[in-house]
Amino acid sequence: MSAVFTFIETFNGQALPASWEALAASRVIADKLGVPVTALVFGNNAAVVAQEAGSYGANKAVISEDATLQDYRLEPYVALVAKLIADHQPKAVVAAATGRGRELLAAAAADTDSPMLGDVLSLAVGDNGMISAERAGYAGKVLADTEIVAGSTQVITVRSRAFKAAEPTTGAAVEITTTPAVLSEDQIATKIVSFESEVGKVNLTDASIIVSGGRGMANNPKEAPAGAGDATIWKAKDGFATIIQPLADSLNAAVGASRAAVDAGFIPYAHQVGQTGKSVAPDLYIAVGISGAIQHQAGMRTSQIIVAINKDSDAPIFKMARYGLVGDLYQIVPALTAEIKKRRGG
């Protein structure tokens, strides 16, 4: 089978939106090489998800709804992906660079002795069939073009929002093939007992607009109430709730934070953007009270438009911002929020 495989990541029988971006990346390769895109869909509701993949650009799908694949576990998933690579020798295997996508494709590449490129920002295929990819290095300060020699299956993960998912089409036909699982339950060491849902979970990687707060949030002039504990932490938390969140709400944006804000206890780790947090690429990134240390830049450098609000005119964040506002964030942000609500009729 000469094709480009795309792993469609699912949870509770629903595809993750990042998988449709991976399909778009696969089309870049497949269209140049003149081969079909084949979606790999495992677990609960795989047949339905495969049909959905067809609407996003997949020509074919290989599915398995075996009970061992109902929930993601590396052992049974990588065993099946490695077997499909060995049996069909696809031109490439592509997945979104999520935690699972990175783990699965890295293991599959190792098991099949295939070359791999991770966290890719763009793709191109030469006339000789060689795939070249743009990747970020040195905490995002350098972009490197890397080529993989043609001939072997090439394993690729793509960064979230680096590729725009195709608009779904109705009535798109997809050829579905069913394949059995490779491992039986007694051959799988890990077991999933249950999942715990997280209320108000932050989804920074898919957000098109992000408003982030940093260490400067500690400068909230509001007095902490009696019994509030550390006044600095309380004031900063209050600032995230009363300053950052309203601006985010007015823009239908997600709330992010710098590592300094997270380490200081201003906001939970799930909000962290940076080298040790989330890597994001929104259309609009608003950095409020963030100086712009290299670790933070590594996680948001690829944002389309960056707006910086900081009282320090020499802060590094201004060097990468398209728009900058120098002044007290506790005066600027409420005025900005009010104007946005006014213009949006809210």
Image (tube, grey):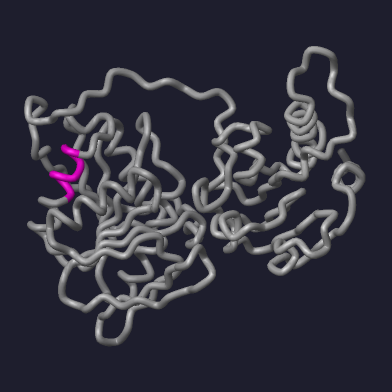
Is 131 placed left or right of 319 in the picture?
A: left
Residue 43 appears in which quarter of the rendering? top left
Q: Nearer the viewer, residue 41 or 302?
A: 302
Q: Is residue 297 left or right of residue 221?
A: left
The residue shown at (16%, 76%) is: 151
Furthest residue in direction front, as rendered: 230
Q: Main secondary structure of the magenta part?
A: helix
Q: Is residue 105 magenta?
A: no
- Tally of numbered tags: 0
In this rendering, is residue 311 above or below 132? above
On screen, residue 20 versus residue 49, left or right, reads right
Q: In this rendering, would 202 be left or right of 92?
A: right
Q: Position of residue 124 (x, y in %)?
A: 38, 76
Q: Residue at x 38, y 70 (%)?
A: 28
**Where's the N terminus, which quadrant?**
bottom left
Q: Nearer the viewer, residue 160 or 234?
A: 234
Indicate the position of residue 213 as horizontal and vertical percent values.
71, 44
**Position above or below: 192 against 69:** above
Report the residue at 83% width, 39% height from top.
219
Considering depth in this image, is 21 or 186 the residue closer to the camera?
186
The quadrant holding residue 260 is top right
View extreme (top): residue: 227
Q: Quadrant of the C terminus?
A: top right
Q: Is residue 77 magenta?
A: yes
Q: Position of residue 223 (x, y in %)?
A: 89, 25
Residue 69: where, in percent of width, then height?
Answer: 21, 33
Say which quarter of the image contains residue 85. Answer: bottom left
- Please give the range of residues in magenta: 75-81
Residue pictured at 56% horizontal, 35% vertical: 269
Give above or below for 61 relative to 47: below
